[in-house]
Image (tube, helix red, strand yellow):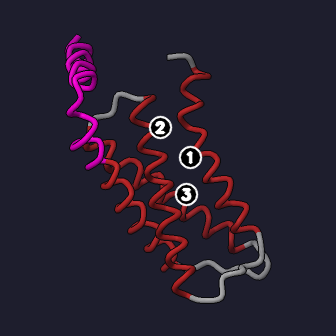
Amino acid sequence: MKRSAKLLYWLPAIGLMSLIFYSSSRTSLVKSELSAVTGHFIGYAVLAITYAFALSRTTKLNRKQLLFIPILLAVLYGISDELHQLYTPTRFSDINDVIVDFLGAAVGSYGYYLWNRLLINRTPAEKCRRLVDKKERRT
């Protein structure tokens, strides 16, 4: 696959990371703790899904790797986001945000894993692709 084609699969993740960075650079508009927690949870669940999608299309990772690597990437991005907030006026860094980011990423990644395993792998095209991938790995 061409490099430019691979980049297209990463655009949703890059776009969401940019949105998170932009949001973290602005004065917080969230008034309640519940909405802040919900925002972190949903945002990082979706981020993990975009990572899993891109990784599944641009690498030859196995299912377990596609489950855990998106969580790791999302948590690392969450940590970098909290470090970024240390230097942003009117914002503060909180370890609890990273914990919520992790939980959201875990749910998102596991949801993608289940979706991929239960629905997509049942199509004849996917079964054929898996057989070809197994043969390529052996050689």
Question: x and y percent of residue 61 in the render?
Answer: 33, 33
Q: What is the three-letter code of the residue carrying label 2?
A: Ala
| Mark 3 or mark 2, earlier in chain | 2
Q: Is residue 15 left or right of residue 133?
A: right
The structure residue drawn at horizontal position 41% and vertical position 29%, both measured from the top left corner, is 59
Residue 64: which numbered mark, if any? none
| Magenta-span inclusion, residue 76 | no
| Mark 1 or mark 3, earlier in chain | 1
| Circle 2 residue | 54
Nearest to the observer: residue 83 or residue 57: 57
Quadrant of the drawing holding the C terminus? top left
**Crowd rating for badge 1 (residues with CA inside 10 Å; few <14, some 14–19, many 20+):** many
| Circle 3 residue | 77
**Crowd rating for badge 3 (residues with CA inside 10 Å; few <14, some 14–19, many 20+):** some
Regarding mark 1 in the picture, which secondary structure is present there?
helix
| Circle 1 residue | 13
Residues at marks 1 and 3 touching, judged by CB atoms closer than 8 Å: no
| Mark 1 or mark 2, earlier in chain | 1
In the depicted structure, whether residue 5 falls above or below residue 80: above
Disc 3 and disc 2: Cα gap in Å?
16 Å
Give the number of the mark in front: 3 or 2.
2
Give the number of the mark in front: 1 or 3.
1
**Crowd rating for badge 2 (residues with CA inside 10 Å; few <14, some 14–19, many 20+):** many
Q: What is the three-letter code of the residue carrying label 1?
A: Ala
Q: Which residues are magenta?
A: 113-139
Residues at marks 1 and 2 touching, judged by CB atoms closer than 8 Å: yes
